[in-house]
Image (cartoon, grey):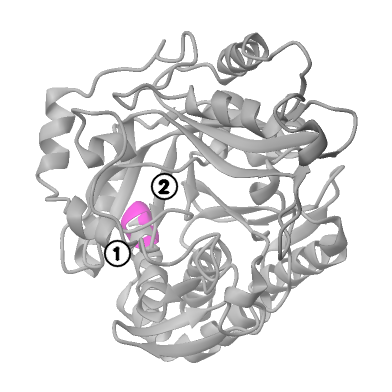
Amino acid sequence: MTLDPVLARIDADLPQATERLFELLRIPSISTDPAFKADCDRAADWLVADLKSIGFDASKRPTPGHPMVVGHSSGDAPHLLFYGHYDVQPVDPLELWDNDPFDPRIEETPKGKVIRGRGAADDKGQLMTFVEACRAWKAVHGTLPANISMFFEGEEESGSPSLTPFMEENRAELTADIALISDTSLFDENTPAIMTQLRGLLGEELTITGPSRDLHSGMYGGVAMNPARVLARIIAALHDDEGRITVPGFYEGVPELSNELAAAWDDLKFDHESFLGEVGLSEPAGEKGRRPLEMIWSRPTCEVNGIWSGYTGDGFKTVLPSKASAKISFRLVGTQDPHEIRKAFRKMVQDMLPADCSVSFKDHGASKASVMTTTHPAFAQARKALSDEWPNAAAFTGGGGSIPIAGHFKEILDMDTMLIGFGKDDDGLHSPNEKFDLSSFHKGIRSWARILHAMTS
């Protein structure tokens, strides 16, 4: 099957492709909030209908949480499985959005046109780049160039509690020659990336309880133990003066960066001053003696993602709080075991509690790091195809984020995974005013068309 007519179709159909994406972006499929359960169902229904419109045998599959969407289009070898997620992050704080987060629009910016709206880059826009590439192939050739399956999840932003059981129950149906994921980013605006390693993720929420109720700080201050003070001491103790994490046994399974990989990453000329400068910072704050790109891609972290206690409204209330809570995440690398780290972290917290305080924990998922082998021929084919579309040659990179399903594909389905995404560092994922460059959406569709051609010609 020839490629040029497909690329021409993609170019001509961009306005219609953008409007289809807008339809999906208008659905507030926030998976973490039960109030949006019906909207998650509606997003799944929309995807089923869209896949059917281009010839997929698609259906919505129930789970204990939000539904999965699975679709198949039979064709010649190879068999490719594409994964994406249709759920999105909450939009709070809403007052920081310039417009309704679920009223997507194209905006002119100093860096070009962008699609603005929650889910534009993470992951609805990226998901639709692959769907639109398939649509163009079908429109031009009447059939797809490979045996393609679609697998869309609705709980990625809420810990994927239904994912592993669903994959295990449907192992035969989901197994393919290779899995493709588009939920990552470019290395820079002119350099596409194929991510070959991702950090794992461990989420913990803890609540320290002291007195049985909130107390008047004039009557009890200085005498009653303040749980906010206890929590602050625990958080401060999680790192030493060198930036290393102090949880006992934390660094077991953390490998040193190889000279070969260090040299390859150095060749990318990562500009950490510009990277931090875009968010108003200047100095790397992680482990001393480590280069910024090394810390982002290959070193573990411990970060406070939220902390609250006492009175936080307007004005002032002299309360000594009964409880203090925090959400803490760990990014993991190498063979670090998230379950062992969870046990060690909880023991560390419990050992630091004073006599009159107790602690309760809530877990928010646990996944290991993923390292992809690049020996599968698809990696070289995709790298060449991406290099033909973008100004610079495609790079094999690491990723600071966590996409647990990449590891699940290997562990459960014994499949290699190729992660190719078209986001940018300033897309504002999980933040107000999320955006996806219109050029990234367009070139992402063209890139997948090129990759499909390279893998099947």
Instruction: State the residue in front, 434 or 321.
Output: 321
Q: Is residue 67 above or below residue 253?
A: below
Q: Is residue 206 above or below residue 348?
A: below
Residue at (66, 73) in percent of width and height: 94
Q: Amino acid at mark 1?
A: Glu
Q: Which mark is residue 419?
A: 2
Residue 55 visible in rendering: yes
Q: Position of residue 107 (x, y in %)?
A: 45, 89
Q: Amino acid at mark 2?
A: Leu
- Residue range of the region highlighted in magenta in the rendering: 452-456
Q: Residues within 10 Å of mark 2 (few under 14, many from 20)?
A: many
Q: Position of residue 447 (x, y in %)?
A: 35, 66
Q: Position of residue 332 (x, y in %)?
A: 46, 27
| Circle 1 residue | 278
Q: Is residue 414 magenta?
A: no
Instruction: State the residue in front, 445 or 249.
Output: 249
Main secondary structure of the magenta stretch: helix
Q: Is residue 453 magenta?
A: yes
Give the quarter of the image for residue 295: top left
- Spatial distance from mark 2 to mark 1, Cα to Cα? 25 Å
Residue at (38, 32) in percent of width and height: 372
